[in-house]
Amino acid sequence: MFDAFRRFRSFALLAPCLAMAAQADEAKKPPTLEDAYRAFHAGMASAKKEEQIKALKAILPTRKDIEVLFSKHADIVWKDEQAQQKLLREHYADVAREVTRKGAIKRIVKHDVRAEKDPSTGYKRVLAMIPRDIPIYTIDVFKEQASGGTGAFLLVNGRWIFFKGIEAMPEIIEKARVNEFLKQAQRIVLDKKDSSFLADQQKEAMPRKGSKREKRMLRWTLKFDTNNAADYVQQMRALGAILAFPVKKGEYRVVHDLSKRPAEAKAE
């Protein structure tokens, strides 16, 4: 009987601990997307500027979120996102009016972008870039007087964030990388010190004996930092490159305009 009492007492002491642990685990769970959006809507419906800005800030991506989503291009994406967020903060009142107009929320329907059979081209490219375990949804918000859709919501670092224009990020990244590539190329050409350094390196690398063609080939080396074939073609197009493919002795198929789809290869 004493052993039974001791076991009962141990269970009685352990039960509150288990209950507290369960509550702690429940508290760690992120809110549902619907709850997160309703909280955002409630904050923007406030008459106080501080609460509106707080609600806006709570749902926008942070630098850490960007590093999770676009680890290789976080600097590019964060620079663009900072500019977007600055505009939103400056025009928070307009954002609040747009979010809260047409009455109270009646229903929210979410759409899993990953589950779509044929997502748009922008989303296809985004899904190939961000981690596969990151949920991404769009939602339709049904209100008293109207309904409408929103951009992308993603669950990152334990909270739902609204990422306006995420489907355009691959193109923005591509353009930024091409621009940086061209700037670097321009600096090499225009900077006299770099030019002198390259000339010295060329002299050292130049073989004492060699054909004119071999010496020409040692003049310049361009290193392309690319993710895929399309990225490589984009950089070549930005440089104004003309591509030639040998088809037989003395004849080539030449592509003058790399922006055309499909590419036109003429015999020359």
Image: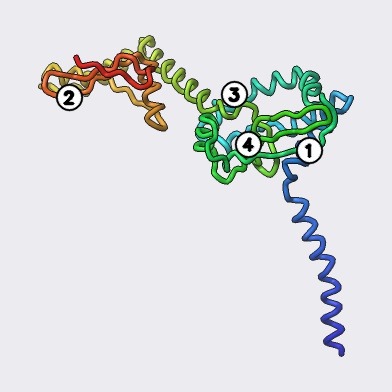
119 vs 252: above or below: below
Q: Residues within 10 Å of mark 3 (few under 14, many from 20)?
A: few
Q: Nearer the viewer, mark 1 or mark 3?
A: 1
Seen at 28% across and 17% down, the residue is 255
Counting residues from the N terminus, which is met first, the one under dot 3 or under dot 2? 3
In the drawing, what numbered circle is on residue 216? none
Secondary structure under badge 3?
helix
Q: Amino acid at mark 3?
A: Lys
Q: CA distance from mark 1 to mark 2?
A: 62 Å
Q: Residue furthest front?
A: 145
Report the Cα–Cα distance between label 3 and label 4. Answer: 13 Å
Distance from the alpha carbon under mark 1 to that under mark 3? 35 Å
Figure check: 230 above or below 11: above
Report x, y in % for residue 35: 78, 41
**Mark 4 and mark 2 residues within 8 Å of each other at the beta carbon:** no
Mark 4: which amino acid?
Asp
Q: Give the mark nearer the N terminus: 1 vs 3.
A: 3
Please tell me the numbered disc located at residue 107.
Answer: 1
Label 1: which secondary element: strand
Q: Alpha-carbon distance for marks 4 and 2?
A: 49 Å
Name the foreground residue: 16 vs 254: 254
Residue position marked by numbered label 2 in the rendering? 247
Q: Is 79 situated left or right of 175 in this image? A: right
User: Which residue, given by chain and number where applicable, does mark 3 sit on?
Assistant: 79
Q: Position of residue 265 (x, y in %)?
A: 27, 19
Where is mark 4, residue-wise?
65
Quadrant for the C terminus in the image: top left
